[in-house]
């Protein structure tokens, strides 16, 4: 069987959920025995989102091989349980960088370099690249942005060309649109969808399937109207109604027969029905929790939920694993002080201090760590959260009043967190941090070892600064236990407090590998500790 290529575009408005639809379809096809992966083409000129503020683009997701990517790749991995890579996220910046570099090297033999054919040829090469590896039966490509955007035009032109260059049975186009409900008229309106599809068809791309986001069920008459005016087959207009959980969407799409329509159009030989038992079991536990806890997420970018998307989703997975509803309360780090910590955090069953960069909010994070340490509240620190746990311990237990990270305080006399040696000569910011999966060896008998149940693990990283090993001995003598370290470089990966109900902080990003069917073990145990704390408080 030839590799099949499915393209997902969006119209009418942004944030309709192209990534969720792409991931849901991929889940259905995977559950029917196909080898599937998803790639994202983003229209912005940045090489990758690594240098973008989270307020600009949400969370920067990091893959196993160290790519800094769009947060939709996190959805892909969580739905499929399959790792993505550097090849799965392509930006306009990467395309132009490649073409311009080749031009400077003389690769075009004096030709005038143009959007067509040079840019579009490079886009097509990237669109087909994963299919040439022989590892996948189906490649789903999500095209970022909204049809009509100037930035997306080269991607759509490349799709147009592939629509005719690939065999008919190897190409399929899905267009996601919005069917708004006007309360004043008490009516669903199809005109925005008609205009969006006309815009797409005007550049030569003809959708095979139209998926309509809606808050009301679409009648057969309305579906037929969309099919008639948008030139798609009857039955190929399907609804994506608002769901109570994103993990319900694959089941909704199965009920709409999206996977069967796709299999028929691509002329894939008979496949069994999708086996979604594990997903259904997860959703059953998620929807009917027996317990609930309140967790404080102390961070810098809490106004934007997508800034901590993987952490939020990890709590969903860990909550279901514990049959527990996790209420995550996002708290702006700048708003936490020594004077109000009890008021802000006193009713929480657990405190997570989130990752981040820069000086803003650091003292608030340190106050949150101190409150959790002194009051026996389950604590979990990630990346910068781990570094601030070390700083707090150095200040308040060891008495190093000016202990700090050299990232924020270069002149400190106690640099308990310092720049990695190989980073000191680096001037370029993009893609130069410690990125991707690295091994970690756990110390037997520690909380970390109990959580993972094995000595050697691997987790993903995204940082420049590290625990300064010059302070390792005094820290451990004072009670801060190093329970995980890199076996090659001896860099500290995990610290914990043995005499605390639950206190663990990690330099890596464990949230990046959590899935509904394989919830991340630290999150699972953190939620369990929060449940025990809640039960103890209710008994008092």
Image: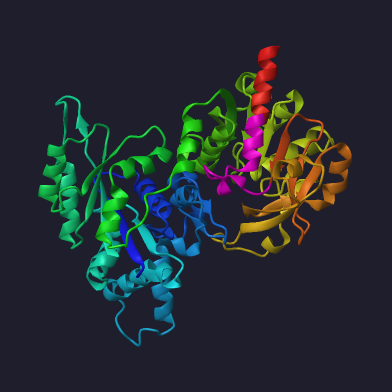
- Is 35 located above or below residue 124 in the figure? above
Residue at the extreme top of the image, as rendered: 540
In the image, residue 268 lies at what x, y percent? 31, 62
Count numbered badges in the picture. 0
Q: Is residue 34 found left or right of 477 in the rendered image?
A: left
User: What scheme was used to colour the molecule?
Assistant: rainbow
Residue 388 in the image: state x and y as whole percent: 70, 40
Q: Nearer the viewer, residue 487 or 147?
A: 487
The quarter of the rendered structure image containing the N terminus is bottom left
Which residue occupies 70% across, 63% down? 422
Q: Classify the position of the C terminus by image quarter.
A: top right
Q: Position of residue 321 (x, y in %)?
A: 57, 35
Position of 406 relative to 150 (above/below): above
Res 204 seen here: yes
Q: Quadrant of residue 375?
A: top right
Q: Is residue 67 left or right of residue 148?
A: right
Residue at 47% from the left image edge and 32% from the top image edge? 284
Answer with the quarter of the image where residue 200 lies: bottom left
The residue sitting at the bottom extreme is: 109
Residue 441 vs residue 325: left or right?
right
| Left or right of 446, for residue 540 | left
Residue 431 is a magenta residue: no
- Tell whether position 522 is magenta: yes
Residue at 40% x, 68% y: name it: 131
Q: Is residue 304 visible?
A: no
Q: Viewer-proximal residue, 533 or 366?
A: 533
Residue interval drawn in magenta: 507-528
| x, y percent for residue 293 | 58, 24
Q: Is residue 141 above or below residue 478?
A: below
């Amino acid at each position: 069987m030839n590799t099949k290529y499915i393209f997902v575009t969006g119209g009418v408005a942004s944030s309709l959920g192209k990534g969720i639809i792409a991931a849901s379809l991929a889940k259905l096809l995977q559950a029917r025995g196909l080898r599937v992966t998803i790639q994202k083409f983003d229209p912005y000129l940045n090489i990758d989102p690594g240098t973008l503020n989270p307020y600009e683009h949400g969370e920067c997701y990091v893959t196993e091989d160290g790519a800094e990517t769009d947060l939709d790749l996190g959805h892909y991995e969580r739905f499929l349980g399959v790792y993505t890579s550097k090849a799965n996220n392509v930006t306009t910046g990467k395309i132009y960088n490649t073409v311009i570099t080749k031009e400077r090297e003389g690769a075009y033999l004096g030709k005038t370099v143009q959007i067509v054919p040079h840019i579009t040829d490079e886009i097509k090469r990237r669109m087909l690249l994963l299919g040439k590896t022989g590892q996948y039966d189906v490649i789903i490509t999500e095209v970022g942005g909204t049809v009509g955007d100037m930035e997306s035009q080269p991607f759509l032109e490349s799709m147009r060309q592939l629509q005719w260059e690939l065999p008919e049975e190897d190409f399929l186009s899905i267009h996601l649109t919005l069917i708004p409900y006007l309360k004043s008229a008490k009516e669903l309106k199809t005109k925005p969808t008609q205009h969006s599809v006309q815009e797409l068809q005007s550049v030569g791309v003809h959708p095979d399937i139209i998926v309509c986001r809606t808050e009301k069920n679409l009648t057969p008459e309305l579906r037929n109207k969309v099919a008639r005016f948008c030139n798609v087959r009857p039955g190929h207009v399907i609804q994506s109604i608002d769901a109570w959980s994103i993990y319900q969407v694959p089941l909704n799409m199965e009920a709409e027969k999206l996977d069967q329509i796709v299999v028929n159009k691509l002329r894939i030989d008979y496949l069994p029905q999708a086996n979604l038992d594990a997903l259904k079991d997860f959703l059953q536990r998620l929807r009917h929790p027996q317990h609930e806890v309140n967790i404080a997420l102390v961070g810098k970018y809490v106004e934007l939920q997508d800034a901590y998307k993987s952490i939020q989703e990890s709590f969903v997975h860990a909550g279901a694993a514990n049959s527990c509803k996790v209420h995550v309360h996002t708290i702006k780090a700048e708003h936490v002080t020594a004077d109000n910590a009890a008021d802000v955090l006193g009713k929480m069953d657990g405190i997570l201090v989130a990752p981040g960069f820069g000086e803003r909010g650091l003292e608030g994070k340190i106050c949150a760590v101190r409150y959790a340490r002194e009051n026996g509240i389950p604590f979990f620190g990630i990346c910068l959260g781990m570094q601030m746990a070390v700083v707090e311990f150095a200040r308040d237990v060891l008495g190093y009043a000016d202990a700090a990270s050299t990232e924020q305080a270069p002149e400190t006399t106690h640099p308990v967190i310092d720049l990695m040696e190989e980073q000191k000569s680096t001037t370029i910011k993009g893609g130069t941090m410690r990125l991707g999966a690295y091994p970690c060896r756990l110390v037997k008998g520690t909380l970390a070892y109990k959580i993972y149940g094995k000595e050697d693990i691997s987790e993903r990283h995204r940082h420049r600064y590290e625990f300064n090993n010059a302070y390792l001995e005094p820290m451990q003598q004072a009670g801060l236990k190093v329970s995980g370290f890199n076996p090659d470089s001896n860099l500290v990966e995990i610290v914990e407090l043995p005499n605390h109900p639950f206190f663990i902080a990690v330099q890596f990003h464990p949230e990046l590998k959590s899935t509904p069917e394989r919830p991340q073990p630290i999150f699972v145990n953190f939620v369990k500790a929060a449940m025990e704390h809640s039960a103890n408080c209710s008994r008092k």
